């Protein structure tokens, strides 16, 4: 099952884009542009961990979801996925106690998958949403998880580059030896 996503052309193109990303914002934008098609979902959300809250940073969906909103990690399914470092698949949101009913009350969402992004500790999550009740097939879930791994690698790389750049002191200009 793990071999299939590596052969997926959309995942391969996205991996190349992630390798070229130079900032967290670029990684988020790449996810926003590509995840919905790769997941075959009605919507996606890119959720960043910001201390003890989840920040719904970007989305691509058939209706507005929660972009720009912040929720406590302990009060939403994306936070649950990050705190437990575990993929969550919910075929029927009405039956899962981890899904906060008020946040979904006016949304046309019946099923979801939420995948943590980043290792060893998740720094984000990728949510895929469906308007119908969906029993997610293993290949679709494998594609979503592969995309999350790509994003995790990119987040780690761009954050590492930012830290490295900040740690390098500017060299003082030296007069040329004459």
Image: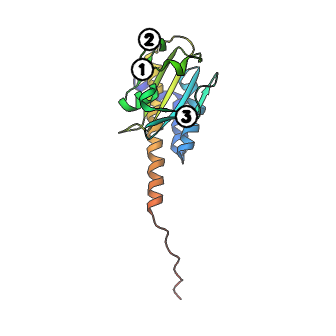
Residue 177 placement (x, y as % from top left): 51, 86
Q: Residue furthest front?
A: 102
Q: Quadrant of residue 20?
A: top right
Which numbered disc, 1 or 3, marks the residue closer to the eye? 1
Residue 137 position (above or below residue 49)? above
Badge 1, how many Cα within 10 Å: few under 14, some, many 20+?
some
Residue 163 placement (x, y as % from top left): 45, 54
Q: Nearer the viewer, residue 176 or 96?
A: 96
Q: Secondary structure at mark 3?
A: helix
Residue 170 placement (x, y as % from top left): 49, 68
Residue 69 position (above or below residue 174)? above
Which numbered disc, 3 or 2, marks the residue closer to the eye? 2
Q: Secondary structure at mark 1?
A: loop
Which residue in the protein does label 1 denote?
Answer: 98
Q: Secondary structure at mark 2?
A: helix
Q: Are marks 1 and 2 in contact (CB under 8 Å)?
A: no
Q: CA distance from mark 1 to mark 2?
A: 9 Å
Which residue in the protein does label 3 denote?
Answer: 31
Q: Residue at x 42, y 20 (%)?
A: 98
Q: Residue at x 45, y 25 (%)?
A: 77
Q: Nearer the viewer, residue 43 or 139?
A: 43
> Which numbered dot is residue 95?
2
Q: CA distance from mark 1 to mark 3?
A: 24 Å
Badge 2, how many Cα within 10 Å: few under 14, some, many 20+?
few
Q: CA distance from mark 3 to mark 2?
A: 28 Å
């Amino acid at each position: 099952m793990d071999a299939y996503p590596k052969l997926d052309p959309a995942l391969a193109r996205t991996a190349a884009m992630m390798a070229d990303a130079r900032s967290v914002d670029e990684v988020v934008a790449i996810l926003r542009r590509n995840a919905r098609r790769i997941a075959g979902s009605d919507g996606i959300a890119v959720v960043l961990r910001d201390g003890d809250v989840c920040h719904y940073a970007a989305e691509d969906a058939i209706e507005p979801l929660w972009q720009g909103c912040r929720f406590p990690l302990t009060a939403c399914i994306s936070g649950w996925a990050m705190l437990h470092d575990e993929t969550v698949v919910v075929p029927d949101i009405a039956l899962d106690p981890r899904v906060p009913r008020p946040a979904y009350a006016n949304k046309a969402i019946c099923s979801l998958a939420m995948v943590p992004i980043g290792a060893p500790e998740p720094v984000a999550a990728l949510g895929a949403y469906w308007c119908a009740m969906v029993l997610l097939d293993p290949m679709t879930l494998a594609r979503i998880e592969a995309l999350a791994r790509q994003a995790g690698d990119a987040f780690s790389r761009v954050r590492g580059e930012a830290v490295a750049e900040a740690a390098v002191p500017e060299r003082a200009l030296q007069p040329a030896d004459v």
